[in-house]
Image (spheres, grey):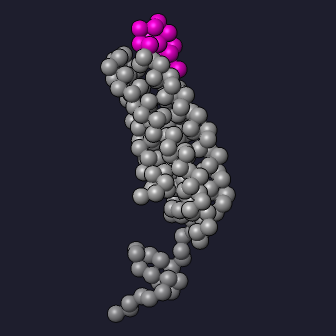
Amino acid sequence: MNLTHLHLMMSHAAIMAALFSAILFLFGFFRKNESIKRVALVGFVFAAISAIPVFLAGETAEELVEDLPGVLEAAIDTHSDFATFSLWMIEIAGIAALASLLLKNVAFFKNSTFALTMVVISFVSAGAISYTGYLGGQIRHTEISSNAKVQTGVQGGEQGEAGGDKDDD
């Protein structure tokens, strides 16, 4: 395993933790359930911590794939630029969540203004980190790229004249 593997594996963990925590926090907010909100806050701390090695391993991952056939430098640059924004957003969510967990008896963290602010922060950070993952996927997964071209003459898994052999028997 190398840093590129770490980058790919941990990115999925950070994305899923952020998405799960945002949805769970929203659920806890509407249910007015402090226990559910605390579990979501722990999830944001995990997402924030796991996003750090993902970001740090990104440069090594870039060096490994940038010269591969079919990899566009523009896709890497877009992913890298958005990753910086996403890291800041998920770290803000993680710090706010950690502060709330550690200072749970402070009035500021008990009021609905903080909870509503946390809902907004959680969805912005989860959306940002998810979009960053999507952009990263476009680097090597051309099938999800908006530039993907559909091959003409291919139907139902068979290759026609444009794709090669076709058994006419």
Q: Quadrant of the N terminus?
A: bottom left
Q: Which quarter of the picture shows residue 168?
A: bottom left
Q: Position of residue 74 (x, y in %)?
A: 67, 58
Query: Which residue reaches farthest front?
Result: 2
The residue lying at 42 percent from left, 34 percent from top is 46
- Chief secondary structure of the magenta span? helix
**In the rendered image of this protein, does residue 28 appear above or below residue 52?**
above
Q: Which residues are magenta?
A: 103-118
In this view, the residue in front, 48 or 22, is: 48
Query: Closest to the observer: 72 or 146?
Result: 72
Residue 53 shows up from this direction:
yes
User: Extreme bottom residue here?
Assistant: 169
Task: Residue at 38% x, 90% y: name it.
Answer: 167
Please identify the quarter of the rendering in which residue 18 is found: top left
Identify which residue is drawn at 32% across, 19% down.
35
Q: Is residue 15 above or below residue 30?
A: below
Q: How many marks?
A: 0
Q: Where does the image place residue 79, in percent across and percent down from the top left? A: 60, 50
Residue 65 image position (x, y, % from top left): 57, 63
Would residue 18 be seen by someone viewing this image from the given angle?
Answer: no
Is residue 152 part of the magenta span, yes or no? Answer: no
